Amino acid sequence: MVNTKTVPQSVQWNETSIKLLDQTKLPLETVFIDLFTIEDVWKSIVSLKVRGAPAIGITAAFGLALSAKSYEETNLEEFKEKLRKDKEHLASSRPTAVNLIWALNRLVTSIQDSTSVNEAKTTLTHEAIRIQAEDEAVCRQIGEHALELFKDGFKVLTICNAGSIATARYGTALAPFHLAAQQGKNLKVYASETRPVLQGARLTTWELLQSGVDVTLITDNMAAHTIIEKGIDAIIVGADRITANGDTANKIGTFNLAILAKTLGIPFYVAAPLSTFDMSLESGEEIPIEERNPEEITHLHGVRIAPEGVQVYNPAFDVTPNDLITAIITEKGILQGDLEVEIKNLFE
Ligand code: MRU
């Protein structure tokens, strides 16, 4: 179990509001905010107050259930129409992580057989709670499978934050480290700071320190040197969307690490739940890549570091082709070899 005193659950359902850990304030402040409306939820997702594919999906699910509670419609068809519009609105908050639309679709599907508006409102809430509970169980299983790959004393590099606060609990790529700390297994983590928003420096290091994990911070451009000099044994990352052939979108810079892993002869692992797979897309070329505000690059904590007027390109994600991925670690086990075939078998 992740120590909830030191690593709080980032999304908490309060029946009339959502209590959200404001990840933009970490690591300096551990602040929770209350979301009361669909607009509060939408803005929190867009502004990265909540981040990480599973946590975004969980927040959106609670947001949709919360919004539906306030509908005054008494006609079920009108209720469903309003729900559909709110779903579209929430789905527009971030384009790359598929868990967002996956969770929203689950909510809409859950009320297919509802016979009254009141029943539908209750069902939506229950489904959102179930999504969060399932994600916790799934992340624990991912952590257990990933631990099988890491021998005692391994040094492992990661990027972004695919940790407990990016999910219901435990995380995906960070789950093995939380579990190892509980079990007394010694793993040493190198966390890439993850420009431009520094999720690695701000969130991963904070979260792992809270759990008593041995973690060392590096800047993104130190990865190749660090792999050689420190003898990194493996790289593990999370995912925002995995297509049917195993191509994987994750935080910008992940693709660089996969190339390094191949060149330097170490395994490159992706850890993700089945909710991150998008079987409607054949390959990574079809994944929409979010481009974010140039200020994330031209400014650091509100202070300008690049000249006024400079052109900026700020993609938030990149796609790692399947041939650079050693294995994908899911709650159902470890996929390796021909990823396209393995994924097909998994979903059949
Ligand atoms: O833009 P972010 O911070 O939401 O991106 C997060 C990532 O890329 C994570 O690695 C991914 O969502 C997996 S979180 C378990």
Image: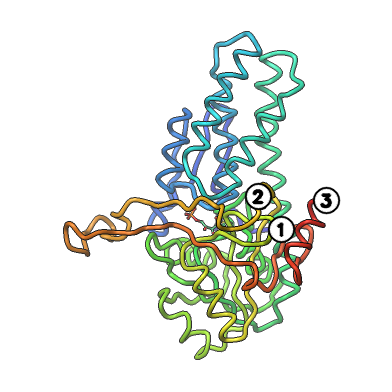
Q: Which mark is residue 140?
A: 1
Of the residues under marks 1 and 2, which one precedes in the sequence?
A: 1
Task: Compute the Cα span from label 3 to label 1.
Answer: 23 Å
Given residues 18 and 302, the one toward you in this image is 302
What's the residue type where badge 1 is placed?
Arg
The quadrant the N terminus occupies is bottom right
In this picture, residue 301 sits left or right of residue 257 = left
At x 65%, y 84%, the residue is 153
User: Of helix, strand and loop, which one carries label 1?
Assistant: helix
Residue 131: x %, y % from top left: 68, 41
What's the residue type where badge 2 is placed?
Asp
Task: Compute the Cα span from label 1 to label 2.
Answer: 22 Å
Residue pushed farthest bottom? 229
Of the residues under marks 3 and 1, which one precedes in the sequence?
A: 1
What's the residue type where badge 3 is placed?
Glu
| Structural crowding at the residue carrying mark 2, measured as other residues with C-alpha within 10 Å and reported as few (<14), some (14–19) or many (≥20) | many
Residue 211: x %, y % from top left: 58, 65
Q: Which mark is residue 278?
A: 2
Residue 35: x %, y % from top left: 47, 33
Q: Quadrant of residue 114?
A: top right
Do the residues bearing badges 1 and 2 touch, measured as CB atoms within 8 Å?
no
Residue 282: x %, y % from top left: 66, 54
- Vertically, is 189 above or below 205? below
| Structural crowding at the residue carrying mark 1, measured as other residues with C-alpha within 10 Å and reported as few (<14), some (14–19) or many (≥20) | many
Nearer the camera: disc 3 or disc 1:
3
Q: Which residue is mark 3?
A: 348
